[in-house]
Image: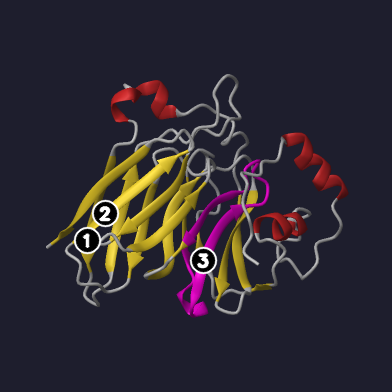
Amino acid sequence: MKPRWTGWTLSAGVLMALNAYAAPPPGGDPFNSPLWSSMQRVVLGGGKVVFDDRVKVTLPERVEDGHFVPVSVDARDVGAVRELILFADYNPIPRALRYQPLHAQPRLSVAMRVNQATPIRAAALDDKGVWHVNGKWLDAPGGGCALPSQTRSTTDWNTLLGRVSGRVWREEDGVLRVRLGIMHPMDTGLVTSVARFNIEQVTLSDASQRPLAKLETDASLAENPLFTLHLNRTATTQLHASSVDNDGNHYRASLPLVP
């Protein structure tokens, strides 16, 4: 059964309690994380899991700024993949995104926030309903999810909110490489007097408005999210990007192909 996501958030107190009282993680978690059983239940809906190094997760060993952690995921070696989920065990908002590569390759690059050192994991759901999970440990300072947006405090934010930019390249094998950026603070709601405000959905469509890739995104993505996706070979000459945030704002743009 596909997990149903309802914006689940863990407070610092709950995280500490789970660390203290969680049962030993089942299934041979390579990080021996006391939160793994909770991640499997809440993020992955309690589905069957195998730890699989064919899911490639690339990220730095350590960062000095928890606001911005670049992560790349590549699950092509798994075979047919219905969706990808990116999450961090010790984040107060664990899930960063859910990706449905409808007519795309099961790989992406993005940046996320972390609140402390944590395993960062990617889970790929295969066509038999099994989650293939892999990840890496990230060493990071505390507070990346609980600090105010840097862009909001240094720019005329009202003129930039929702601005969409992007480019599309057709590679030698016909695959379309897409870079899509959206100006948005992605506020987590963990900063005093700043409500949660984040993009929730992103869709890429072809010239006939057929969806090619869909993302569900959460506030643990870095502000002004920038996505790199790879779409399957298609004859379309133009892509359309659309997104919506939790305040009901819609952002749209057309992305012409670079010759």
- Looking at the picture, does residue 146 appear above or below residue 200? above
For the record, the magenta segment spans 73-99
Image spot of residue 116 (x, y percent): 64, 41
At x 30%, y 30%, the residue is 160
Q: Which residue is label 3 attached to?
A: 83
- Between marks 2 and 3, how big is the CA–CA gap? 21 Å
Residue type at mark 1?
Answer: Ala
Q: Nearer the viewer, mark 3 or mark 1?
A: 1
- 37 falls in the magenta region: no
Residue 107 in view (yes/no): yes
Q: Which residue is label 2 attached to?
A: 240
Image spot of residue 232 (x, y percent): 32, 72
Please, which residue is most extreme toward the top here?
A: 193
Q: Which residue is label 1 attached to?
A: 207
- Between marks 1 and 2, how big is the CA–CA gap? 7 Å
Residue type at mark 2?
Answer: His
Residue type at mark 3?
Answer: Glu
Q: Are marks 1 and 2 in contact (CB under 8 Å)?
A: yes
Decide if residue 135 is on the left or right side of residue 246.
right
Q: Earlier in the sequence, mark 1 or mark 2?
A: 1
The secondary structure type at the circle numbered 3 is strand
At x 59%, y 62%, the residue is 135
Quadrant of image for the N terminus? bottom right
- Between marks 3 and 1, how big is the CA–CA gap? 23 Å
At x 29%, y 59%, the residue is 178
Quadrant of image for the C terminus? bottom left
- Looking at the picture, does residue 128 appear above or below residue 63? below
